[in-house]
Image: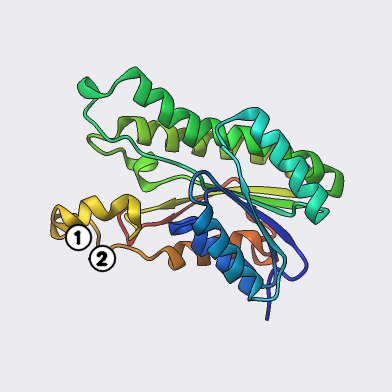
């Protein structure tokens, strides 16, 4: 059974990792997929081809989610091209890990703009058509680091914790319009962003994970599918940790 048939999903930062896995999972379940990328047009074209091969409409947009004007233009373009936005996944993000005394103001601002301001930017745009349609699902990618904190990741943790507060607040604002807003807090997932952890000795990280392994992007995509579909029709304002038991 296809859970997202005839729905349109917008996924930011989808040219690789968790974003790509979510886009593919949604397409497998019948959703038309609009997605953003920031740099690699080659990766974006490859993903576009994978998605359309699944029998859905798909298009990549080069757009910086941290730029408000770009997000406004993106939402307008997607509505023009697809007619609706039923699901929005705010996935775009970066990390600039460093101890606080070595973390520059520029690095702090860069993380906040890419990770937190981007969620404000696009959510503000997509709730307009969703409120008109009186339905929708917004899924924000936080992190287990935003729940628990982690040494050397103060900027990343702060941005991801901010997403949780934002998610809970907006869920209360627009719940009466049948729009659900939830967050996913992944643990350590095997992506380009975490390769340096594994290269530096993944075993020490496994000690912190009851399931003794890094997660797969597809496992986060499964959680996103649940939140995007009608299976979660009475779930809003929640943070689902997909972390192998780190948050217990």
Q: Is residue 248 visible to us here? A: no
Q: Is residue 172 visible to us here? A: yes
Q: How many marks?
A: 2
**Residue ID at (43%, 38%):** 160
Res 64 → quadrant: top right
Q: Which mark is residue 206?
A: 1
Percent of width and height locating residue 102: 21, 23
Percent of width and height locating residue 48: 61, 63
Which residue of the protein is positioned furthest toward the front in this rendering? Answer: 42
Whether the residues at callouts 1 and 2 have beta carbons within 8 Å, the answer is: yes
| Crowding near the residue tagged with mark 2, few <14, some 14–19, many ≥20 C-alpha atoms within 10 Å | some
Can you say which quadrant of the picture contains the C terminus?
Answer: bottom left
**Residue ID at (66%, 36%):** 71
From the viewer's side, name the closer residue of 245 and 119: 119
Above or below: residue 220 compared with residue 74? below
Above or below: residue 138 compared with residue 164? below
Q: Is residue 208 left or right of residue 156?
A: left
From the viewer's side, name the closer residue of 161 and 128: 128
From the viewer's side, name the closer residue of 140 and 81: 81
Which of the colour schemes (rainbow, by chain, secondary structure, one colour) is used? rainbow
Q: Which residue is mark 2?
A: 213
The numbered mark, 1 or 2, whose residue comes first in the sequence reads 1
**Residue ID at (46%, 61%):** 220
Percent of width and height locating residue 206: 20, 60
Res 51 → quadrant: bottom right
Q: Is residue 54 left or right of residue 141?
A: right
Above or below: residue 3 compared with residue 103? below
In what element is the residue under mark 1?
A: helix
In what element is the residue under mark 2?
A: loop
Can you say which quadrant of the picture contains the N terminus?
Answer: bottom right
């Amino acid at each position: 059974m296809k859970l997202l048939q005839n729905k349109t999903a917008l996924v930011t930062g989808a040219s690789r990792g968790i974003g790509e896995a979510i886009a593919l999972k949604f397409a497998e379940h019948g959703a038309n997929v609009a997605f953003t990328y920031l740099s690699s047009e080659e990766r974006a074209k490859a993903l576009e081809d994978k998605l359309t091969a699944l029998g859905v409409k798909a298009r990549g947009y080069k757009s910086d989610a941290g730029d408000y004007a770009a997000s406004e233009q993106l939402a307008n373009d997607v509505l023009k091209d697809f007619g609706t936005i039923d699901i929005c996944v705010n996935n775009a993000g970066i990390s600039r890990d460093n101890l606080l005394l070595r973390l520059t103001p520029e690095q702090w601002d860069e993380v906040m703009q890419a990770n937190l301001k981007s969620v404000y930017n696009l959510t503000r745009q997509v709730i307009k058509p969703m409120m008109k349609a009186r339905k929708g699902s917004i899924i924000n990618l936080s992190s287990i680091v935003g729940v628990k904190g982690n040494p050397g990741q103060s900027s990343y943790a702060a941005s991801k914790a901010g997403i949780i507060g934002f998610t809970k607040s907006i869920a209360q604002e627009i719940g009466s319009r049948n729009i659900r807003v939830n967050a996913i807090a992944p643990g350590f997932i095997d992506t380009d962003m975490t390769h340096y952890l594994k290269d530096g000795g993944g075993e020490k990280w496994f000690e912190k994970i009851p399931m003794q392994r890094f997660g797969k992007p597809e496992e986060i995509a499964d959680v996103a599918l649940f939140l995007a579909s009608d299976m979660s029709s009475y779930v809003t304002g929640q943070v689902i940790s997909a972390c192998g038991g780190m948050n217990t």
